[in-house]
Image: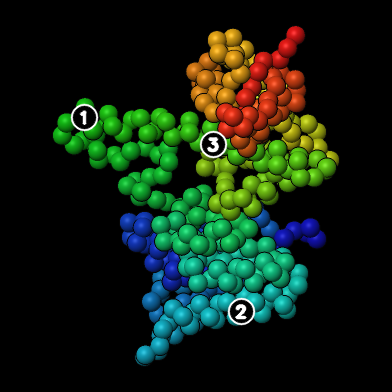
Amino acid sequence: MDHEDRIALFLDYENLALGAREHHGGRAFDFRPIADALAERGRVVVRRAYADWSYFDEDRRMLTRSHVELIEIPQRMGASRKNAADIKMAVDAVELAFERGYISTFVICTGDSDFTPLVHKLRELNKRVIGVGVEKSTSALLPPACDEFLYYDRLEGVDLPPVRGRRGRPAKPAEPQQPEPAVEPAPEQPPAAEEPVRDAEALAVLVAQTVAGLQGSSEGEVTASRLKRTLLRKDPTFSESDYGFRTFGELLRHLAGHNVVELAEGPAKGDPEVSLPEHGDQEVAFALLRTVVAELAAAGGPVALSGLKNQLRRARPEFSEKKLGYRSFLQFGKAAATAGEVTLAWSAEADDYLLTPRQG
C-alpha cells in the first residue's frame, strides 16, 4: 500500500451532470465509471462533489452510495452559483494540497477552463493532476494543462445513445430502414474503413518519434512505463483503448510485430525495454533511398532532396521516415549519408541539398 498513489477527487458536479445530459440524449450522469477508472490508478482517499443539491435530488442518492461527500453551494439571489462553487472547490483543493502531503494525485472533474489555473498551481506543488470531463462540453484549454485527461464519454461502463457513436461504433440502427438504403451506406462506408488505418499509421509515428526522442535526450533505457508517461505528457488524452488495445503492453506487442519498435526484458517484470529496430525497416528504407538516388542520378546527375520523398513513395507507397523515428525527411537523409548509403551536401547554387549514390 505504501507505493500506491493517494488520490483526492473533486467534482464540479453541475458541469458534469448538465454536460452529460445535454450531449448524451438526456441520460443521467453515472459516477461509477469514474470510480472504476480511478481505482486502477490508486487509492481514492477524498471524494467531494460541489453543487446546489436542490437541483440534483436523485443524483445525491447515487453519489452518497459511492461515499462522495456532498458540498452544498446554495443559490442566492443576485449571486452566481457557478462562481461560488468554482471558488470553493479551488480553495479546498489547494488547502488539501498543503495540509495532506501524502496525497500525490488530484482528480479535477470538470470541463470548465476556469479551473486551468488550479491545475497549474497543483502541478506547481508537485501534484499529479488528472482531469475528467464530458468530451463535447470540455474546453480545449483544460486537457493540455493536465498530466492525464479522461473523457467521461470514453470510460468503460458509460452508456451512450447510438446517435452519439464514436469511432468504430456501428451506424445508427434507424438508418438502414430509411428509403433508398443502397444510396445511404455508400458514402458512410469509406470513413469507417479508413479511419482505423489512419489511426494505426498515426500511432506508429507517435510511438516511434517518442522513443527516438527519449533515446536521444538521455542515456537511460526507455521502458514501457516511461514511454507511456511521455506519451501522456505529449497528449494528456492519449489512451491505448482509442486504438483498440486493452493494455499498453498489448499495443507495444502489436507495434513490435510490425517492426516499429523492439521489446527486450526490462529492469522490472512487466515493464519491458523499448527501442527502435537497429535493422529491418531502416535498412530496407536506406536501400530504397540508395536505389532511387542511383536511378535518378544516372539520368540527370545529383538528385535534389526536394521532391525525392515522393519518388520513394512511388516505389514504396508505405514509406514513412517518421515511422522509423525521424522527425523530417532531411534527418532521414542525413542518417543514410552517415551510414554510407548516399552522399548529401548543401548546394548554394541549387538552393537545396543534393544527393549522389554511394561510390563502389
Judging by the rendered image, the residue that carries numbered circle 3 is 202
Answer left or right for 279 relative to 59. Answer: right
Judging by the rendered image, the residue that carries numbered circle 1 is 183
Which x, y percent locates residue 260?
65, 29
Closer to the chain start, of discs 3 and 1, is 1
What's the distance in space between the residues labelled 3 and 1, CA to CA?
31 Å
- Image quarter for residue 319? top right
Label 3 or label 1, whichever lies nearer to me, is 3
For residue 320, say whether it is visible: no
Judging by the rendered image, the residue that carries numbered circle 2 is 92
Q: Secondary structure at mark 3?
A: helix
Q: Nearer the viewer, residue 337 or 273?
A: 337
Closer to the chain start, of discs 1 and 2, is 2
Q: Amino acid at mark 2?
A: Asp
Quarter of the figure with the N terminus: bottom right
Q: How is the image coloured?
A: rainbow
Quarter of the figure with the C terminus: top right
Which x, y percent locates residue 139?
46, 62
Q: Secondary structure at mark 1?
A: loop
Residue displayed at 24% across by 38% down: 175
What's the distance in space between the residues labelled 1 and 2, CA to CA?
56 Å
For residue 212, say whether it is visible: yes
